[in-house]
Amino acid sequence: MAIQRMDNVGIVVEDLDAAIAFFEELGMELEGRAEIQGAFADQCTGLDGVHCDVAMLRTPDGHGRIELAKYRSPALITGPRDQPHNVLGTHRIMFAVDDIEDTVARLRPHGAELLGEIARYEDLYLLCYLRGPDGIIVALAEQLR
Protein backbone atom coordinates (compact mmCIF):
# COMPACT_ATOMS: atom_id res chain seq x y z
CA MET A 1 0.00 0.00 0.00
CA ALA A 2 1.35 3.44 -0.90
CA ILE A 3 -0.45 5.53 1.75
CA GLN A 4 -2.42 4.91 4.92
CA ARG A 5 -4.63 8.04 4.89
CA MET A 6 -4.58 11.76 4.21
CA ASP A 7 -3.40 13.27 7.49
CA ASN A 8 -3.94 17.01 7.02
CA VAL A 9 -3.86 19.98 4.69
CA GLY A 10 -1.36 22.71 5.58
CA ILE A 11 -2.16 26.38 5.06
CA VAL A 12 0.13 29.34 5.74
CA VAL A 13 -1.73 32.31 7.22
CA GLU A 14 -0.81 35.80 8.35
CA ASP A 15 -3.28 36.03 11.25
CA LEU A 16 -3.35 32.69 13.06
CA ASP A 17 -5.99 33.69 15.61
CA ALA A 18 -8.38 34.97 12.92
CA ALA A 19 -7.92 31.79 10.86
CA ILE A 20 -8.56 29.60 13.92
CA ALA A 21 -11.73 31.59 14.73
CA PHE A 22 -12.96 31.20 11.12
CA PHE A 23 -12.49 27.43 11.05
CA GLU A 24 -13.92 27.00 14.56
CA GLU A 25 -17.02 28.93 13.45
CA LEU A 26 -17.24 26.54 10.51
CA GLY A 27 -17.39 23.70 13.04
CA MET A 28 -13.81 22.47 13.27
CA GLU A 29 -12.30 21.72 16.67
CA LEU A 30 -8.90 23.03 17.76
CA GLU A 31 -6.69 20.07 18.70
CA GLY A 32 -3.75 22.16 19.80
CA ARG A 33 -1.20 24.85 19.11
CA ALA A 34 2.59 24.64 19.07
CA GLU A 35 5.70 26.63 18.30
CA ILE A 36 7.88 24.89 15.73
CA GLN A 37 11.59 25.50 15.12
CA GLY A 38 14.84 23.61 14.87
CA ALA A 39 16.83 21.43 12.52
CA PHE A 40 13.96 19.01 11.81
CA ALA A 41 11.72 21.89 10.64
CA ASP A 42 14.46 23.21 8.34
CA GLN A 43 15.14 19.72 6.99
CA CYS A 44 11.57 18.81 6.11
CA THR A 45 10.57 22.21 4.66
CA GLY A 46 13.80 22.94 2.78
CA LEU A 47 13.90 26.39 4.42
CA ASP A 48 16.55 27.85 6.73
CA GLY A 49 15.74 29.22 10.16
CA VAL A 50 12.15 28.00 10.36
CA HIS A 51 10.28 29.41 13.33
CA CYS A 52 6.50 29.27 13.17
CA ASP A 53 3.38 28.90 15.23
CA VAL A 54 1.01 26.14 14.17
CA ALA A 55 -2.53 25.14 15.07
CA MET A 56 -4.16 21.82 14.23
CA LEU A 57 -7.93 21.70 13.74
CA ARG A 58 -10.06 18.63 13.04
CA THR A 59 -13.47 18.06 11.55
CA PRO A 60 -16.21 16.85 13.94
CA ASP A 61 -16.02 13.32 12.49
CA GLY A 62 -12.31 13.20 13.35
CA HIS A 63 -11.22 12.23 9.83
CA GLY A 64 -10.13 15.57 8.36
CA ARG A 65 -7.57 18.01 9.72
CA ILE A 66 -6.09 21.38 8.78
CA GLU A 67 -2.73 22.61 10.01
CA LEU A 68 -2.52 26.41 10.05
CA ALA A 69 0.98 27.92 10.17
CA LYS A 70 2.09 31.48 10.85
CA TYR A 71 5.77 31.97 10.02
CA ARG A 72 7.94 34.15 12.22
CA SER A 73 10.94 33.24 10.06
CA PRO A 74 11.85 33.04 7.33
CA ALA A 75 9.78 36.08 6.35
CA LEU A 76 6.31 35.41 4.97
CA ILE A 77 6.09 35.66 1.18
CA THR A 78 2.83 37.31 0.27
CA GLY A 79 1.01 37.38 -3.03
CA PRO A 80 -2.41 38.36 -4.28
CA ARG A 81 -5.14 37.15 -1.94
CA ASP A 82 -7.91 37.53 -4.47
CA GLN A 83 -6.77 35.04 -7.09
CA PRO A 84 -9.58 33.32 -8.97
CA HIS A 85 -10.17 29.61 -8.58
CA ASN A 86 -8.52 28.69 -11.90
CA VAL A 87 -4.97 29.86 -11.03
CA LEU A 88 -2.48 27.01 -11.41
CA GLY A 89 -1.76 25.40 -8.06
CA THR A 90 -4.53 27.25 -6.30
CA HIS A 91 -7.59 25.33 -5.34
CA ARG A 92 -9.95 25.04 -2.44
CA ILE A 93 -10.97 23.03 0.61
CA MET A 94 -14.52 21.67 0.54
CA PHE A 95 -16.70 20.93 3.54
CA ALA A 96 -20.07 19.18 3.72
CA VAL A 97 -22.47 21.26 5.85
CA ASP A 98 -25.99 20.80 7.19
CA ASP A 99 -27.28 24.27 6.26
CA ILE A 100 -25.29 26.22 3.67
CA GLU A 101 -27.12 29.53 4.12
CA ASP A 102 -26.68 29.47 7.89
CA THR A 103 -23.01 28.54 7.52
CA VAL A 104 -22.34 31.42 5.11
CA ALA A 105 -24.14 33.82 7.44
CA ARG A 106 -22.06 32.67 10.43
CA LEU A 107 -18.79 33.00 8.48
CA ARG A 108 -19.45 36.51 7.13
CA PRO A 109 -18.47 38.23 10.42
CA HIS A 110 -15.14 36.38 10.09
CA GLY A 111 -14.49 37.98 6.71
CA ALA A 112 -16.01 35.34 4.42
CA GLU A 113 -17.15 36.60 1.02
CA LEU A 114 -19.01 34.56 -1.57
CA LEU A 115 -17.11 34.28 -4.85
CA GLY A 116 -20.35 33.80 -6.78
CA GLU A 117 -23.60 32.71 -5.24
CA ILE A 118 -25.14 29.62 -3.70
CA ALA A 119 -25.94 27.35 -6.65
CA ARG A 120 -28.15 24.30 -6.97
CA TYR A 121 -26.72 21.20 -8.66
CA GLU A 122 -29.78 19.32 -9.88
CA ASP A 123 -31.80 18.16 -6.88
CA LEU A 124 -28.69 16.84 -5.14
CA TYR A 125 -26.65 19.71 -3.70
CA LEU A 126 -26.44 23.37 -2.88
CA LEU A 127 -22.86 24.53 -3.46
CA CYS A 128 -20.83 27.71 -3.06
CA TYR A 129 -17.27 28.98 -3.00
CA LEU A 130 -16.23 31.66 -0.57
CA ARG A 131 -13.01 33.40 0.27
CA GLY A 132 -11.94 33.08 3.89
CA PRO A 133 -8.97 34.38 5.88
CA ASP A 134 -5.82 35.25 3.95
CA GLY A 135 -7.56 34.50 0.64
CA ILE A 136 -8.23 30.81 1.34
CA ILE A 137 -10.99 29.50 -0.95
CA VAL A 138 -13.47 27.35 0.94
CA ALA A 139 -16.24 25.43 -0.79
CA LEU A 140 -19.42 24.37 1.00
CA ALA A 141 -21.82 21.63 -0.04
CA GLU A 142 -25.25 20.90 1.40
CA GLN A 143 -26.71 17.56 0.33
CA LEU A 144 -30.41 17.93 -0.45
CA ARG A 145 -31.42 14.25 -0.37
Image (tube, helix red, strand yellow):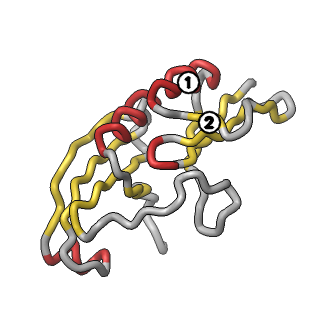
* x and y percentages locating residue 118 in the rendered image: 73, 30
* x and y percentages locating residue 16 in the rendered image: 30, 45
Give the residue displayed 41% in from the left and 56% down from the top.
Answer: 11
Give the residue displayed 59% in from the left and 61% down from the top.
Answer: 90
Q: Nearer the viewer, residue 136 or 77?
A: 77
- Position of 17 relative to 54 (above/below): above
The answer to whether the residues at label 2 and label 1 have Cβ atoms under 8 Å apart is yes
User: Judging from the image, what secondary structure is the residue with disc 2 in?
Assistant: strand
Kind of residue at disc 1: Thr
Kind of residue at disc 2: Leu
- Crowd tier of the residue under label 2, counting other residues whose Cα lies within 10 Å: few below 14, some 14–19, many 20 or above: many
Give the residue displayed 22% in from the left and 79% down from the top.
Answer: 48
- Crowd tier of the residue under label 1, counting other residues whose Cα lies within 10 Å: few below 14, some 14–19, many 20 or above: some
Residue 143 tag number? none
Residue 140 tag number? 2
Q: CA distance from mark 2 to mark 1?
A: 9 Å
* x and y percentages locating residue 53 in the rendered image: 22, 54
Residue picked out by circle 1: 103
Q: Quadrant of the C terminus?
A: top right
Locate residue 124: give its quadrant.
top right
- Position of 109 relative to 2 (above/below): above
Would residue 115 be found to the left or right of residue 46 on screen?
Answer: right
User: Judging from the image, what secondary structure is the residue with disc 1 in?
Assistant: helix
Give the residue displayed 45% in from the left and 43% down from the top.
Answer: 133
Q: Nearer the viewer, residue 117 or 63?
A: 117
